[in-house]
Image (cartoon, grey):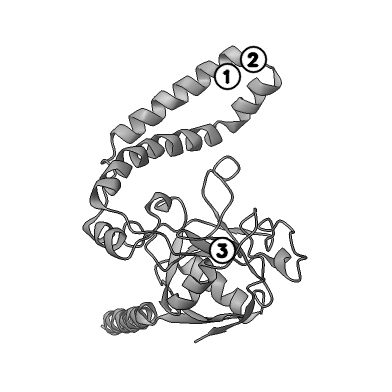
Amino acid sequence: MKKIVFALLTVSLAGLTACQGGTQKNKEMDKETLVKIETSVGDITVKLYNETPLHRDNFVKLAKDSTYEGTLFHRVIKDFMIQAGDPNSKNAPKGKMLGFGGVGYTIRSEFVYPKYFHKRGALSAAREGDDSNPKKESSGCQFYIVTGQVYNDSTLMGMEKPLNGNMVNRAYNELMQKNIKEVLRLQKAKDQDSLNSMQLKLFLQAEEMVATLPEYKFTPEQLEAYTTLGGAPHLDGEYTVFGEVVSGMDVVDSIQRVKTDWIDRPEEDVKILKMTVE
């Protein structure tokens, strides 16, 4: 009898612990992480999404250890986005091309789509292109804030077909990456016929894979946001959205309006002075 009572007591305590742990986790998920970005032209406050914990925790870490202090908004394109976070931008001389710096690691992509998308004010991670980065892993430090533009319904509808085409290209790139050893072997052997045959085979395989998926369609939430607030819908599913601006969008707009040079760098530096986790 004692053994049975002990077992029941153990289960009861375990259940209670699990319940308390679950409650604690829920509280943590409900808690919002805010980061104030103090810039040379004003303050921007962003909210970080709990559903993208790798990006959230990394951004918080870099904000706390002052990695971003003194970096620039080095790439600014009006009606598109403002980009920052390159460590090489600290004290960079005028005219220097930036955007290639990092912190020595990348972050696994965390697409929470279609819940989070590239609406105006979205905070997203920059990354290298698909050719060298087929898994779409994010830069360990560079980020951008979307300003975007407002679209009409017909334009958005016209974008759905190309976006469906991009799904085939993404699937093809993933298959090529999985077979990269054979690709390199054929390239080294200069066996172009076999390489062409392999590429065609993989492309047809990619088409078959995508054919089993539902067609890309903008959600009602996306249509509402893109036709009223604006954004950059062509980036959806390509870059990780991990937060959004909750105050200071006027500062973002003032940054996107600055005069830039031929490489989209502001002619007058726009600096991140400090980041504070609130």
Q: Are marks 2 and 1 in contact (CB under 8 Å)?
A: yes
State whether residue 168 is above or below residue 159.
Answer: above
Count neighbours of disc 1 (C-alpha within 10 A) and say few if under 14, some if 14 to 19, many if 20 or more: some
Disc 1 marks which residue?
A: 195
Residue lying at the far front of the rendered structure = 259
Disc 2 marks which residue?
A: 191
Q: Secondary structure at mark 1?
A: helix
Q: Nearer the viewer, mark 3 or mark 1?
A: 3
First along the sequence among labels 3 and 1: 3
The residue type indicated by label 3 comes to Gln
The residue type indicated by label 2 comes to Asp
Please name whichever residue, 105 or 101, is drawn nearer the observer in this view of the structure: 101
Q: Is residue 176 left or right of residue 189?
A: left
x and y percent of residue 40 in the render? 61, 80
The residue type indicated by label 1 comes to Leu
Give the residue displayed 78% in from the left and 65% down from the top: 93
First along the sequence among labels 2 and 3: 3
Disc 3 marks which residue?
A: 83
Count neighbours of disc 3 (C-alpha within 10 A) and say few if under 14, some if 14 to 19, many if 20 or more: many
